[in-house]
Image: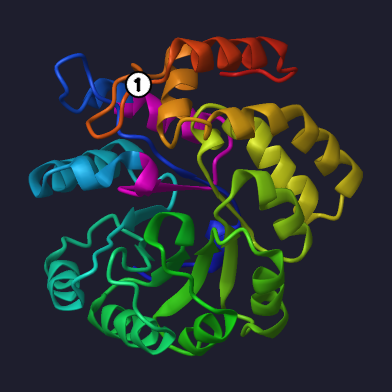
């Protein structure tokens, strides 16, 4: 399967992994979440990302979640799978062994804990891209990995034929601007920050891989579309409507806040796996008030 990059324009959603009261993956809820995304205008799905609490999922659970998402999605939207690690050799081996049917691309974050140099990052991603039999989307998220990838490194990796883009969550608009100004035509940029998505897309990025989109895909997709087509006034209005929720869902970490919002909307339970815990009563109250004030349909 050849990835058609134009299919990844717009809103991608980094799906949560819903759990039931016993701590097991709640597959009926996951099915409902995927159907919610397809119905409400999401352009592509991302499973096993940070929002999916992937570090707490066993290899068997990860494989089953991907298989289940492929089955439910049934080819209706492109499917991107998060595959990340800080042991390059082990990560490459894992990618080589992955069943590729139904997977359109991999999302690979910078390694956490090792804190490699820019040269190390370049060699790491080149090895991963060489090993992968699907296109690779880089993911720069220094707030989680303590490792920031420079624009120069990203642009060097953009020359690799199997590296198709980057999810940029550095929060640095200067860095993102440098990538956008100097990238090859066939290299895509997605915002990794809900709150910065509107200006990032207005600068020329192709879209957003979102957390808040789990609960509110339609207004998030509208904001991205408005910014993409230069309807900046409309995009600013939509952003202003969503701004309070963008902040609240991250107040006690991700996916704590978004799961609380989704629980309120009946999409999944507000169950987490340690070391993460469920949202506090104070945060839930703030989220519920913000949702009640939201002037867009939830479902």
- Where residue 81 appears, as percent x and y from the top left, is 32, 55
Q: Quadrant of residue 6?
A: bottom right
Q: Quadrant of residue 53?
A: top left
282 left or right of 160 in image: right
What scheme was used to colour the molecule? Answer: rainbow
Which stretch appears magenta? 30-51
188 left or right of 30 in image: right
Residue beneath the point at 51% across and 68% down: 166
Up the image or down, 64 lies above or below 266; here it is: below
Residue 45 in magenta stretch:
yes
Up the image or down, 137 lies above or below 68; here it is: below
Q: Which quadrant is the N terminus positioned in? A: bottom left
Q: Which residue is mark 1?
A: 278
How many numbered tags mark residues here? 1
264 left or right of 190 in image: left
Residue 36 in sight: yes
Residue beneath the point at 13% across and 72% down: 90
User: From this viewpoint, which residue is outermost toward the left?
Assistant: 60
User: From this viewpoint, which residue is outermost toward the right?
Assistant: 233
Up the image or down, 250 lies above or below 132; here it is: above
Residue beneath the point at 39% across and 41% down: 51
- Where residue 47 appears, as percent x and y from the top left, is 34, 46
Residue 46 in magenta stretch:
yes
- Where residue 176 appears, as percent x and y from the top left, is 65, 69
Residue 141 in sight: no
Residue beneath the point at 50% across and 89% down: 156
- Where residue 161 appears, as percent x and y from the top left, is 42, 86
Dot 1: within a 10 Å radius of its alpha carbon, few (fewer than 14), some, or many (20 or more) residues?
Answer: many
């Amino acid at each position: 399967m050849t990835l058609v990059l134009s299919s990844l324009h717009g809103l991608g959603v980094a799906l949560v992994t819903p759990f039931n009261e016993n701590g097991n993956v709640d597959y009926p809820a996951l099915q409902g979440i995927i159907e919610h995304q397809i119905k409400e205008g999401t352009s592509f799905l991302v499973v096993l990302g940070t929002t999916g609490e992937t570090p707490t999922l066993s290899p068997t659970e990860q494989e089953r979640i991907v298989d289940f998402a492929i089955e439910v999605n049934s080819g209706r939207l492109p499917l991107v799978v998060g595959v990340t690690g800080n042991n390059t050799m082990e990560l490459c081996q894992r990618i080589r062994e992955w069943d590729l049917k139904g997977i359109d691309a991999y999302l690979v974050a910078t390694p956490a804990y090792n804190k490699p140099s820019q040269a190390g990052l370049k060699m790491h991603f080149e090895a991963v891209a060489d090993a992968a039999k699907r296109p690779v989307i880089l993911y720069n998220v220094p707030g989680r990995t303590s490792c920031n990838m420079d624009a120069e490194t990203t642009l060097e990796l953009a020359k690799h034929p199997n590296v198709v883009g980057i999810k940029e969550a550095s929060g640095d608009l200067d860095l993102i601007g440098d990538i956008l100004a100097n990238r090859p035509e066939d290299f895509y940029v997605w915002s990794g920050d809900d709150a910065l998505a509107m200006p990032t897309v207005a600068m020329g990025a192709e879209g957003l891989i979102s957390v808040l989109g789990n609960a509110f895909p339609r207004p998030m997709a509208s904001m991205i579309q408005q910014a993409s087509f230069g309807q900046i006034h409309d995009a600013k209005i939509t952003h202003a409507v969503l701004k309070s929720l963008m902040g609240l869902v991250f107040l006690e970490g991700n996916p704590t806040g978004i799961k609380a919002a989704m629980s309120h909307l009946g999409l999944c339970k507000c169950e987490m796996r340690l070391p993460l815990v469920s949202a506090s009563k104070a945060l839930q109250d703030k989220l519920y008030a913000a949702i009640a004030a939201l002037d867009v349909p939830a479902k």
